[in-house]
Amino acid sequence: MVPLSRTAGAAVTVLSFIGVLSYVILNNSKYRSKSSSRKVTPKKPKSGLVAAIGNTPLIRINSLSDATGCEILGKAEFLNPGGSVKDRVAVKIIEEALECEALSPGGVVTEGSAGSTAISLATVAPAYGCKCHVVIPDDAAIEKSQILEALGATVERVRPVSITHRDHFVNIARRRASEANDLASKQKKTNKSGNQINPLNNSGAVLETLSSECIADGKGGFFADQFENLANFRAHYEGTGPEIWEQVGGKLDAFVAAAGTGGTVAGVSRFLKEKKSAIKCFLIDPPGSGLFNKVTRGVMYTREEAEGWRLKNPFDTITEGIGINRLTENFKLAELDGAFRGSDMEAVEMSRYLMKNDGLFLGSSSAMNCVGAFKAAQQIGPGHTIVTILCDSGMRHLSKFYNPQYLAQYGLTPSASGLEFLGLSGDTNMVNGTRAKEKTRKRFL
């Protein structure tokens, strides 16, 4: 027979458990009742493709941050609808052109581009009722031409030559816009006179390069001119720069980026310097580009030019969209404190390192920017916040930058296991012999 005291104790325990359970259930139902009574304000959907451009996240690049003791953050521009930072530029160029009536709705936007700007223009132009014609060097990754054609742009691939040559892809794109305007003018005269339009240029050659679809409406053309058009600069001065400043809460020590047209590095650096002059802004420059010497010595000069050898024209690098041997109107507005040289090998190794350690599949210019961010961290030391631009993903670089056979031709087969290609020892928490400080990871949205 069970003792009475033990039975009473068990009963008290059961009753206590039932009481606690009832309390939990009651309070949980009250919480759910309060939660369900709250009004949830639905977020309004963005109006069209253009509204989805910009406001990209700023992400901590964990492997580089942990290795340097700095907070190295990347502006994830590859998340724009068109897949790159150039979406911002495409929108600004087209909107300003429409506003000043240099471009008519239904007109054709022409551009000479190694890829990303062209893809962004082809993506954005239809949202404004316009068409797109792109002139691209034939040594650019073939997938870029394929993407452009899939987007509905007409693509003209030409051999790479010096910018001073009349058949440089940028100069051809300028002519195509002029030709489209000439045809539009002729069509207007034809409509008035009733005569049939003669689609010939001044030399009598048929303008086959501009498809009939591009010019059928006779709305004329507009040359985007990304290198000299200051809408490029304004896109970053008014957009990218302010976003970065807000995302870091004003706590920023350095900004690093490469330059092609110079719009990104100029617009962002100028805005950040105006907000906080102590922020250090650096250029990272690929092989063959003259900007490093222009920033550090005041003279546009490259070793390749002096020694008379180049792998290709206009500059000696496998990275696409960055490096140049002239000063653009956009780059002239940059506020820079210094510059770093970056090599093709460093860019290739960095891209593989980030893919393996961070899951970041980046394009060649993005990888070079991360090389620059690392070098800035080595120069200014641990405990600082550094931002760079992740321009685009590796999706557009499969045939070259991520092609083992292509890289092997130039002796660029990656082999590093860590960051030794940047002079870092096996201990990934060591920078210049100093152990990096353990830092609390922060999330920047």
Image (cartoon, helix red, strand yellow):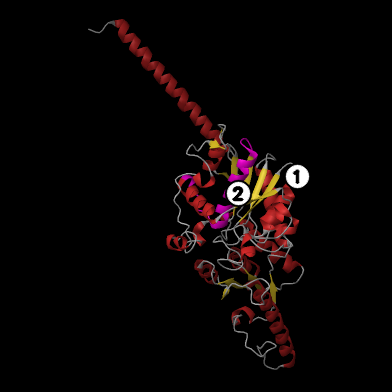
Query: In the rendered structure, does residue 94 fall within the stretch colored magenta?
Result: no
Along the line of sight, which residue is nearer the eye, 41 or 285?
285
Q: Which label was assigned to residue 275?
A: 1
Q: Position of residue 137 (x, y in %)?
A: 57, 71
Camera-side residue: 339 or 257? 339
Which of the marked residues, 2 or 1, is nearer the chain's N terminus? 1
Question: Where does the image place residue 301, in percent across and percent down from the top left?
Answer: 68, 60
Is mark 2 in CB contact (under 8 Å) with mark 1? Answer: no
| Count of numbered circles in the view | 2
In the picture, residue 156 is in which quadrant? bottom right
Please report the bounds of the magenta region as a residue range.
357-384
Image quarter for residue 41? top right
The N terminus lies in quadrant: top left
The reply, left or right, for residue 20 in relation to residue 269 is left
The answer to whether 389 is drawn above or below residue 16 in the figure is below
In the rendering, at what x and y percent does residue 389 appear? 61, 51
